[in-house]
Amino acid sequence: MSVNQSKTMVVSWLLLSVTGVVACWASLLNGQFETIYGLPSVIGAAMLMWIRQQPDFYCQPFYRLAWQTSMILLWLLLVPGCYHLAQQL
């Protein structure tokens, strides 16, 4: 198992994703929305895409839950962006 596939590294990428979502939502609620705050979440999700592509990891509950959590965080990231876009129209 390589270092990038360790559970510690997966948790680190998930924490980075959570940080991006929290920063994005905080900027929206503060009235100064910035899309750049969502970049850590996009990077974290991209770094965890290997889980879905490798069936031997995806069948393990920890890795499957990590991948699903990453996708949920991406959806949560879309909400403030869509809300901000709707306000500008």
Image (tube, rainbow, N blue to C red):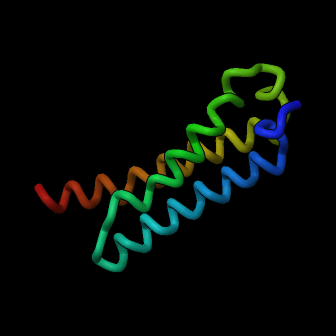
The quarter of the picture where residue 46 lies is top right
**Residue that sits furthest to the bottom in the current view:** 30
Residue at left offset 43%, top offset 67%: 25
Question: Who is closer to the viewer here, 7 or 62?
Answer: 7
- Give the residue drawn at x 18%, y 62%: 87
Q: Nearer the viewer, residue 17 or 80?
A: 17
Q: Give coordinates of residue 31: x percent, y percent.
A: 28, 77
Task: Answer left or right for 77 relative to 43.
Answer: left
Above or below 63: residue 69: below
In percent of width and height, residue 76 lies at: 48, 54
| Farthest residue, direction front | 3
Residue 4, quarter of picture: top right
Query: In the image, 44: left or right of 53?
Result: left
Left or right, residue 64 beside residue 7: left
* In-image side of 68 versus 88 (left or right): right
Residue at 36 percent of width and 75 percent of height: 29
For the N terminus, the image quarter is: top right
Determine the image quadrant of residue 88: bottom left
* Residue closest to the far right: 1
